[in-house]
Image (cartoon, grey):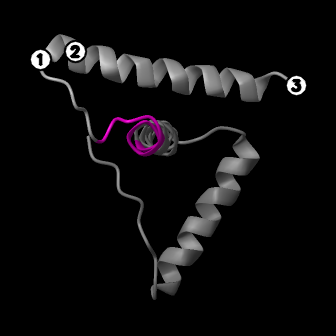
Amino acid sequence: MPIIDVNPRRRAELKAERKREALAEGYNGHLSPQARRYRERSTVERVNGRLKEEFGGRHVRARGPDKVMCHLMFGILALTVEQLMRLTP
């Protein structure tokens, strides 16, 4: 399901409506389902981007599905270890 955030560039009424919605969500203390999906989606996209840029997911120089899966899983393992090391003081 594609989730695209609306950009209210020159529409003052849309800006005001979004501001009212944000205040209402803040008062209620919960997020709308669309906001929750958008947050989860952006988290997943950040992980995929880091896997491609920093951990060799963009250029896989292996042939065969098993070797490619192994290569990507080592990248995910390295990403997980790095995140765990950031968590511990």
Q: Residues within 10 Å of mark 3 (few under 14, many from 20)?
A: few
- Residue 19 vertical position relative to residue 45 in the rendered view, above or below: below
- Residue hosting label 1: 64
Q: Residue at x 63, y 65 (%)?
A: 20
Q: Amino acid at mark 3?
A: Pro
Is residue 56 one of those drawn in magenta?
Answer: yes
Question: Which region of the structure is painted magenta?
Answer: 49-58
Q: Position of residue 32 (x, y in %)?
A: 53, 42
Q: Residue at x 52, y 85 (%)?
A: 12
Determine the residue located farthest toward the bottom in the rendered image.
10
Residue 53 vs residue 86: left or right? left
Q: Nearer the viewer, residue 11 or 51?
A: 51
- Dot placed on the residue nearer the N-terminal end, 3 or 1: 1
- Residue 56 vertical position relative to residue 88 in the rendered view, above or below: below
Q: Residue at x 43, y 36 (%)?
A: 51
Q: Nearer the viewer, residue 62 or 46?
A: 62
- Residue hosting label 3: 89
Mark 1 vs 2: CB contact within 8 A? yes
**Secondary structure of the residue carrying numbered label 3:** loop
Residue 22 vs residue 17: left or right? right
- Dot placed on the residue nearer the N-terminal end, 2 or 3: 2
Q: CA distance from mark 3 to mark 1?
A: 40 Å
Q: Quadrant of residue 1?
A: top left
- Residue 33 vertical position relative to residue 70 in the rendered view, above or below: below
- Residue hosting label 2: 67
Q: CA distance from mark 1 to mark 2?
A: 6 Å
Mark 2 vs 3: CB contact within 8 A? no
Residue 17 vs residue 1: left or right? right
Q: Nearer the viewer, residue 6 or 17?
A: 6
Q: Residue at x 42, y 18 (%)?
A: 74
